[in-house]
Amino acid sequence: MQRLIIIAIAGIIVGWVGPLLLGWTVNSGSAQEQTKAALTELKVELCTERALAANAEAASLDFNGRRDLAREHAIFPGSTSYDTAVANACARELQKPQN
């Protein structure tokens, strides 16, 4: 009986504490960061597509033109202003030559 209790306690320690110590768990902070990064990436793609639909020659615009175009298309439903990170990344994407 005593041996069974020791094995059970060892199993709990190895099964629960081991992954924590080795970093095999996802905590809410890292999950939120990953979700925010994925959402920002999606918004950048949407912003870029919307901006290119409005102006196919966006790559030929100067910095201010690309920035303004990106800011205009980085406003999404439910918000009243653009997301700076999305607008900046969108403007960088607009600078790249499009196929």
Image (cartoon, grey):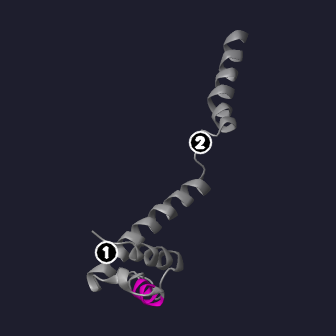
Pointers 2 and 1 in contact (C-beta within 8 Å): no
Q: Residue at x 39, y 80 (%)?
A: 76
Return the disc, 2 or 1, that comes first in the chain's sequence.
2
> Badge 2 is on which residue?
25
> Image quarter for residue 4?
top right
Q: Main secondary structure of the magenta part?
A: helix
Closest to the observer, 30 or 54:
54
> Image quarter for residue 68?
bottom left
Element marked by disc 2: loop
Rendered position, 6 above or below 87:
above
What numbered label is drawn on residue 94?
none
- Please say whether residue 65 is one of the residues in the magenta stretch: yes
Residue 2 lies, in percent from the top left, at 73, 11
Q: As shown in the figure, which amino acid type bears the numbered disc 2?
A: Thr
Closest to the observer, 91 or 26:
91
Query: Taking the image as drawn, is residue 79 in sight?
Result: yes
Closest to the observer, 21 or 52:
52
Range covered by the magenta-colored residues? 64-72
Element marked by disc 1: helix
- Please say whether residue 79 is one of the residues in the magenta stretch: no
Rendered position, 39 above or below 47:
above
Q: Residue at x 40, y 66 (%)?
A: 42
Rendered position, 19 above or below 85:
above
Q: As shown in the figure, which amino acid type bears the numbered disc 1?
A: Glu
Residue 99 lies, in percent from the top left, at 27, 68
What numbered label is drawn on residue 49?
1
Closer to the eye: label 2 or 1: 1
Report how many numbered discs are placed on residues in the image.
2
